[in-house]
Image (tube, rainbow, N blue to C red):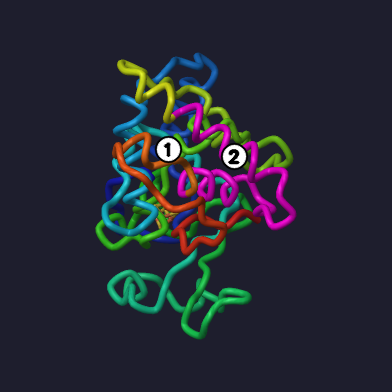
């Protein structure tokens, strides 16, 4: 997710914010391709991010699509630093989650309330969900985030700009396995209902032996993945 800081949450759109949005829109119109990195290395890093072992490292540039696409941000009770930087009135209990798990919603434009002047105003203290988010999960899995959801068009446009590289057979095999995992999961009765959940589960379930060169247990069907929750 996009970085940088701003001290003024809740402000109206400013010239800087509008300029940022225009720049992002211009990039989208141009549709310039973006290097996504070598696939197998990216997959191993993304799986570690989903397990909470590291943060995602996305070269977002001026993009703020995932902060402006009507997504609920889940925050867990142990994220005390994050919770201390978000006004209580912006949080509400997460449905079907243990006590203390909360969601942060979005404003009437679909923007996260912590996004100010086109930048995350709590970047140093942003939720674990935001630290793990990486829109490259969609080209990695072949899942179209905006296929059935107009509010995710900006993420869809950005995600389709990424181009992975495949310098070895391992990269190609890992990509095929990840896309196959997504296709297989899609057919299951217990498949996640939203695109983000499906893509994350496919990344988790992908054949990590391809990446790590070792045997693995069968794909998992449940997830504690720190993902944005779609509206
Ligand atoms: S949509 Fe992707 S590139 Fe854009 S801010 Fe989010 S993670 Fe970064
Ligand atoms: S807290 Fe809001 S603005 Fe900051 S990275 Fe997360 S979604 Fe984006």
Mark 1 beta carbon near ligand 2 (under 8 Å): no
Ligand 1 in which quarter: top left
Give the CA distance from mark 2 to mark 1.
41 Å
Q: Is residue 137 above or below residue 218?
A: above
Residue furthest bottom in the image: 99
Q: Position of residue 147 (x, y in %)?
A: 70, 35
The majority secondary structure of the magenta stretch comes to helix
Residue 174 falls in image quadrant: top left
Disc tally is 2
In the rendered structure, find residue 182 and report the number of the disc placed on it. 2
Residue furthest front in the image: 215
- Is 94 on the left-hand or right-hand side of 173? right
Q: Is residue 179 above or below residue 217?
A: above
Mark 2 beta carbon near ligand 1 (under 8 Å): no
Q: Position of residue 176 (x, y in %)?
A: 50, 27
At horizontal 32% and vertical 25% (from top left) the residue drawn is 37
Q: Quadrant of the N terminus?
A: top left
Q: Earlier in the sequence, mark 2 or mark 1?
A: 1
Give, as a single range, the part of the protein colored magenta: 175-204
Q: Position of residue 161 (x, y in %)?
A: 48, 22
Q: Quadrant of the C terminus?
A: bottom right
Q: Which residue is mark 1?
A: 15
At horizontal 28% and vertical 72% (from top left) the residue drawn is 81
């Amino acid at each position: 997710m996009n970085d940088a800081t701003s001290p003024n949450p809740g402000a109206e759109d400013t010239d800087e914010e509008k300029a940022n949005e225009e720049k992002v829109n211009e990039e989208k119109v141009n549709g310039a391709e973006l290097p996504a990195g070598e696939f197998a290395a990216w997959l191993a890093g993304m799986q570690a991010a989903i397990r909470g072992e590291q943060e995602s490292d996305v070269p977002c540039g001026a993009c703020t699509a995932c902060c402006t696409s009507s997504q609920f941000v889940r925050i867990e009770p142990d994220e005390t630093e994050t919770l201390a930087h978000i006004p209580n009135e912006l949080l509400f209990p997460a449905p079907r989650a243990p006590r203390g798990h909360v969601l942060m919603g979005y404003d009437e434009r679909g923007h996260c309330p912590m996004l100010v002047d086109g930048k995350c105003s709590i970047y140093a203290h942003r939720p674990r969900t935001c630290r793990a988010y990486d829109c490259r999960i969609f080209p990695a899995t072949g899942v179209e985030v905006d296929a059935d959801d107009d509010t995710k068009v900006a993420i869809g446009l950005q995600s389709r700009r990424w181009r992975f590289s495949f310098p070895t057979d391992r990269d190609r095999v890992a990509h095929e396995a990840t896309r196959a995992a997504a296709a297989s999961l899609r057919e299951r009765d217990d498949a996640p209902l939203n695109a983000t959940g499906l893509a994350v589960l496919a990344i988790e379930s992908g054949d990590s032996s391809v990446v790590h060169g070792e045997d693995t247990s069968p794909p998992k069907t449940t997830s504690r993945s720190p993902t944005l929750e779609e509206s």
